[in-house]
Structures are given as structure tokens and as C-alpha cells.
Amino acid sequence: MAGINRNAAQILANVVGNKKVGQYHQILISVGELVAHCKPGNFVAISVGGPSSRMVLRRAFAISRTAISPQYGGTIELIVAPHGSGSSWLCGLPEGAQIDIALPLGTAFGIPTTTVNALLVGGGYGSAPLFGLAEVLKERGCRVDMLLGASTAAKIYAPLEGKRSVNSLRIFTEDGSMGETGRITTPIAQLITDLQIDVIYSCGPMAMLKAISQILDGGNVVHQCAVEEAMACGIGICMTCVLPVKDESGKIGNLRSCIDGPVMDGASIEWDLVGQTVVL
Amino acid sequence: MSQLDFSTTLGTAWFSSPIFTASGCAGSGKELAQFFDLRDMGAVVTKSIMTKPRAGRATPRMAETPSGMLNSIGLQGPGIDAFLANDIPWLVEQKARIIVSIAGEAAEEFASLARRLRGVAGISALEVNISCPNVENRGLVFACQLESAQHVIEGVRRTIGGDLPIIAKLSPDVTDIVSIARGVVDAGADGLALINTVLGMVINPNTMRPHLGGRTGGLSGPAIRPIAVRAIYQVHEALPKVPILGMGGVASGADAFEMILAGASGVSVGTASFGNPTAIIKIQDELRAILIDKGFTSMREAIGFAHRPESSVR
């Protein structure tokens, strides 16, 4: 088992931007020098609701992108959909508001040392961290193709500026309201052959991650997936966000997705045991 | 009044601060050590350890509730061998004070765990968790029946000898917590940890089924604090000489002060650390300021203060 992200810190930070884009908010947070330690795949945990809140748990969000600007110094961008009371509170914050945030947390996407062909697959707002990842991969000289999918157009997160960092982008919606009609997983097998894909980076609903892992089962394509499990703390102490993972010796154990994840090797996750009782 | 003796004792064990982690809410301290020095608080109460490695219950294991949360972890842990090989040496290296919490499926398991821990250097006390609600059946919540609670504590006492203080962790889900408390003290407990989580359930309106994988879970957080204060008050009133480690929804110095007034010698912080990794330090600083503001020169003077007649003066 891994340890907590060694760069993790808890700070008070200012919201320096909050822009509503479709059904989601792009929230920009000034985090100072910590930005240097924020890697694609890492997440943050934010205290929500203010001091008298009845919400006792932090909310976890993937870091979408990082930047350094003369005006705000180091900033991180989060993509937040106001679905629950915690995320709605966050989306309602004005610029200048101060938040209590812990970051960077969890594992990051592994970046290859050689130039590889990478396919990035994002479901819903799960695509958020993939654009920052795409930029890093492009800088390394990798070929980067991207698939985004959701049930409907409003749930697709695909910022215009993000499209510059990929060689190709295909969008799938189940209702056909944007891009191609159908599921995002349908073209993957063919794309692996056509584009000679070496590694798939994925982020989105667990069912999507599982489906990709099944497509890749037995092959040589590496699958780095960022998982989603309900977390109470985000820092490895509550043991609620566990997933059944097989180690190199074949032993299955429940690993914390906040510490040993969120980025995990898709081939090591025992997808059929997710939500089941694991017998050691 | 700037001089404050903030130290406390639980049986023969001395601690520089009355603020502790709560078992099951801090692992073995490694993650919280990223945010503060573990020597800056009373002690790390480790997550209840069992004999064998344990995977715990199925997910979902968590549901947030108003001012609280339900958990259904089911005592996931590495087992005593890995715990003694990794966690204890690490904590000793950090110079943290350590209270080891143990759990078992039968009285014999508690006793055999106590045997493994008896000679281990660096441990200040043993918490005997006889009240975890996330087990297969209520019969395994030893603290719900007087006889089984006593049976566990007697076995641990016999095994451990007089070396380490034993703190029995009790459940609030009983008709009369005072009789259970008195029973485990008679059986050899030196102190009491009050309270474990309260058994609860959340039903998911979408699936229309219990939300947690384990169906029921333990309720923690500020929602249960008045229950904890009541339990501590009742037990301290009946057994004023028995030290109590109080816990249940403490999120501020004022909350910790309330438990001390009710009769707690020490206060554990659990769920608050989930929402704030440095909650323990914040609570400790706030408590120190409150005690000084109220004119106490020693934290121990405040223990059980709420029981004193209105006319009493310090």
C-alpha cells in the first residue's frame, strides 16, 4: 500500500474565478507554490458549507488544469457540477471567497518516458482532468487522441481550448444530442488497432472504467484509470473509499482509492468484486 | 492566568494533552502526520486491530447525514502481525504516545491479542473495543450484554496483568450504560471509552434499498454528541473515580470542554478529522484557551465540574 501524497497540505485559498459553462462551473483557485506539486490525476478535498454547516465531510474534486499567472500566482481549475448540497455551495461562491482546501491528494497519471500513442477516454465531467493530462503528454511528444461520452450533450465537458492539445477528439452521446450516437466504449477496440494505442487513460463512471478494462483484458495496452468511490476524508483515514485490487502475488485486498488511487492500473482492479464482500 | 497544566492520566498512563485520536478515525497516524506532528497531541488511538488481516465490509461504506455520517467499514485492517511489524515501530519512531485498540470475534481473540501486545515497548494503554456495531450480528457487540462484556475484559485483564491500563469501549445502544460500565470495571477495566457509534441506517430513495453495503452503519459526528455527553455524565456520576475517554462528535474546543465537564479525563476526536485534517490541533488550542479563560490552572480540575453543586467555587 502506498502512503499519502507527500506534498499534501491543508491551506486557506481564494476562489479567483467562478464561471458557469453550461451545466457546470469552472472554478479557479489560487494555491500558490503548491501548484508545482499538482499533477494530472491528483484531486483536492474542500470543506463545504461554512463554519456552521451540517455537512461534516469534505468534497473531493479532480484537478482539471493548473496554471501560473502574474495576477494570481499558481492556480488550479476544478470542473464542478452543482448536483448535491456541497457542490452547489461551492458553485455559489463569489470570486474572492476563501475556502479550506487540502491538496494535492492521491496518485497521478503516470507519464511515459518515451513517446507513446495515448487514447484518453472521459465520461461526463470525468473528462475534466484529461485536458491537463493531454497537455503534458503532448509536451512529451506523444500522440494524443480523445474520446468523450455522456448520456446527453449537456453532460459533455469539452472546452474549446482543450481541443488544441489533442490530435483528434470524438464525442459520443447516448441520445445523439451531440457528436456520434452511442456509447463511448464502442470504438475503442478498433481505435487500438488503427492508432496503435499503447496506453489508455480514462476517467469517468465506474461502469465505463470496467467496460474499458474488459475490452483490454489479456492485451498489451496499459490502462490507467482514475476511479470514483464515495470518500469521507480524502486523506486515507476513514477507509470508506476502498476498491478490491489484486497485487503482484495475486492476493486481493481492499485498497483506498484516495491513497492508492484515484489513478490505478485498470488491470489490477477486481471489477466484479466492486461492491462485494472481499474474502482474504 | 497563563500557566495551565494541560496533562491528563488514564489509569497509570500519563499524557501531555487530553486530546486523542478516536480509534478507527486515524488509521495508525501516518496520514495525519502529513498535517501535524503527532507528538503535539495526547496520543494516537490506533484503528482496532484483529488477529488476522481483514478486508471489511462491502462498499458503499459511507453516507453523510445531517451533522454526521454513517460508516460501515467492518474493522478492515492488516492483522496483528503486520501491525506489530510496521505500525507500532513507526509510531515509536515518531515519539507519539500510543493507545492500541483491539477487537475480536470472541473473548479468546481479545485475550490472545492482549498477549501479543503485553511486552511491546511504547504502548501507553489498551483500548478494548467491545462495541463495534459493524459486525455480523448483535451477539458480537459484546458491550450490549453485561456477561459477554465482562467475559472479554476479564480475559484481557488476566492476560495483560497489571502492566497496561485497560480502557473498555462501550456502546450507547444499551438500556442502561451505567450497569455495563460498572460491570466491566468490576471485571478489571481501568477506564472507559464512551461512546462508540450509534447504530443507524440510510435508505437510498433511488434504489429504495439500504444505502450501505452492510445495510446498517455506525452514526458519528456532532449529531451524536449529546448522547455521548449524557453517557459520560451518567457514568461519571455513578463511578466518579473511573477515568473516561470521551468521544462522539467533538468538533471544537467547546465540545471537548463539555465532555470534560461531564466527566471525561480525555477526549478523542474522530469524524472531525475527516472534515478537517488538523481538527485535533484546532480543538486542542481552543480547549486550552477556554480552560484558561474559565480560570482553571489544571485541565484535571475541570473533569466532572458539571456534577458540582451550583454554589461550588474552584
Image: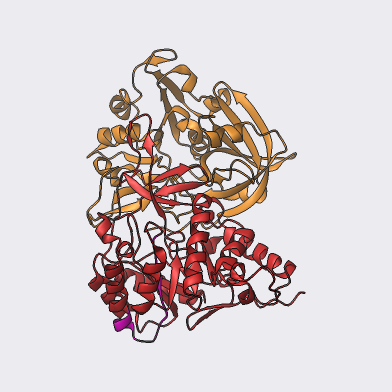
- Going by the image, does A74 lie left or right of B186? right
B271 above or below B100? above
* x then y, percent, for residue B208: 33, 31
* x then y, percent, for residue B19: 56, 68
Q: Is B164 a magenta residue?
A: yes
Q: How many marks do you count on the picture?
A: 0
B74 above or below A178? below
Q: Nearer the viewer, residue B174 or A120?
A: B174
Q: Is B115 a magenta residue?
A: no
Chain letter, red in picture: B
Magenta segment range?
Answer: B157-171
Going 70% across and 39% down the picture, which residue do you hit? A97
Colour mapping: by chain
Can residue B31 be seen here? The reply is no
- Going by the image, does A95 lie left or right of B167? right
* x then y, percent, for residue A158: 51, 24
Chain A on-screen colour: orange
Q: Report the quarter where the C terminus of chain B lies.
A: bottom right
Q: Nearer the viewer, residue B244 or A150?
A: B244
- Going by the image, does B146 lie left or right of B299? left
